[in-house]
């Protein structure tokens, strides 16, 4: 997904000199092409993430759309105060890019596990979360963010997941993007972010044959009101996310619904993963729970 992101950003930067990329001394083998082509639109802030967010805010105040690229919890929890007081409060066009959402850096341990980032970012009223489920949604989300500069958080998985879309989907905040159609239309899976492999495994099982499947790649505090009417159409919804259940995507959906006819079940990463290390596939297999 990170290569898709850089490809889209590079294309956009050719036409728009106000697009700027900042990294914190990482991203090598991915960001070099952008840095070489646009040296005046690229900054390496060094291992100083909080300062990096301040720099991004200052550049955004001068009319630039700034993309801040980092991994794991470094662009989120380490910079929470700067995101709150500089970016969100001033409603600045800064897109925070996290490569390695969920357990993408599982072998590096809890410090690198992005399992609480939805909970943090979605409490900021102006932040739009962009969590694409496959490479096609990455392109659509990046193009949307470039056309609509605003405080945003782009969460990318480290590895490419199962490809659901054969062509670029149209994305809009709060909208559901269909991944699988069913004749009965009574039950559905709803995902966001890098859980397309998990969804594919679910859909391959006989008991889920009649389930439809949707993705919500763009969402946030401002987009809850859209969900209530959509949710009411279903008898049952199962959400899947590579995040803890508390404060995550499933929590956001449940908070959006004020009825009791639709049953909403959330499947997520169990908190017993804390302190554990291993490959992403190993940790998900062992700690993904209902």
Image (cartoon, rainbow, N blue to C red):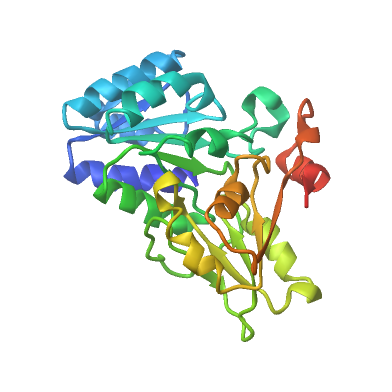
Q: Residue at x 46, y 53 (%)?
A: 224
Task: Farthest residue to the front: give it.
Answer: 259
Location of residue 260 by image quarter: bottom right
Q: Residue furthest bottom?
A: 183
Vertical arrangement, residue 22 with respect to residue 231, above or below = above
Q: How many labels sit on residues?
A: 0
Res. 177 in view: no
Residue 40 drawn above or below residue 287? above
Q: Quadrant of residue 231?
A: bottom right
The reply to whether residue 233 is visible in this rendering is yes
Front-most of residues 194 and 93? 93
- Residue at the location (30% across, 43% down)? 10
Measured from the top left, where is residue 201 in percent x and y? 73, 63
Give the vertical position of 185 relative to 239 (above or below): below
Against 113, residue 254 (above or below) is below
Q: Quadrant of residue 82?
A: top left
* Left or right, 187 with reference to 255: right
The spot of residue 212 in percent (x, y) is 62, 74
Residue occupying image coordinates x 17% and y 45%: 15
The answer to whether residue 105 is left or right of residue 88 is: right
Residue 106, percent from left and from top: 70, 33
Residue at the location (62% across, 51% down)?
A: 250
Q: Residue 80, percent across and down?
A: 47, 23
């Amino acid at each position: 997904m990170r290569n898709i992101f850089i490809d889209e950003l590079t294309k956009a930067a050719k036409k728009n000199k106000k697009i700027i990329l900042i990294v914190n001394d990482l991203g090598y083998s991915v960001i070099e092409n952008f840095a070489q082509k646009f040296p005046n639109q690229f900054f390496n802030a060094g291992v100083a993430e909080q300062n990096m967010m301040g720099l991004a805010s200052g550049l955004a105040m001068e009319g630039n759309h700034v993309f801040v690229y980092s991994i794991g919890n470094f662009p989120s929890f380490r910079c929470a105060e700067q995101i709150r007081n500089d970016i969100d409060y001033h409603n600045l066009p800064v897109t925070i890019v996290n490569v390695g959402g969920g357990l993408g850096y599982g072998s590096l341990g809890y410090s690198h596990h992005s399992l609480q980032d939805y909970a943090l970012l979605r409490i900021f009223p102006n932040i739009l979360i962009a969590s694409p489920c496959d490479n096609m949604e990455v392109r659509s989300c990046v193009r949307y963010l470039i056309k609509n500069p605003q405080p945003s958080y782009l969460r990318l998985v480290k590895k490419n997941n199962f490809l659901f879309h054969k062509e670029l989907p149209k994305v809009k905040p709060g909208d559901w993007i269909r991944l699988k159609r069913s004749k009965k239309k009574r039950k559905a899976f709803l995902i966001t972010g890098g859980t397309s492999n998990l969804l594919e495994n679910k859909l391959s099982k006989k008991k889920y044959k009649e389930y439809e499947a949707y993705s919500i790649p763009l969402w946030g505090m401002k987009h809850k009101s859209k969900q209530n009417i959509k949710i009411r159409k279903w008898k049952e919804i199962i959400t899947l996310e590579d995040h803890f259940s508390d404060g995550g995507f499933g929590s956001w959906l449940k908070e959006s619904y004020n009825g009791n006819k639709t049953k909403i079940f959330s499947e997520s990463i169990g908190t017993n993963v804390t302190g554990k290390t291993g490959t992403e596939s190993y940790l998900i297999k062992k700690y993904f729970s209902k």
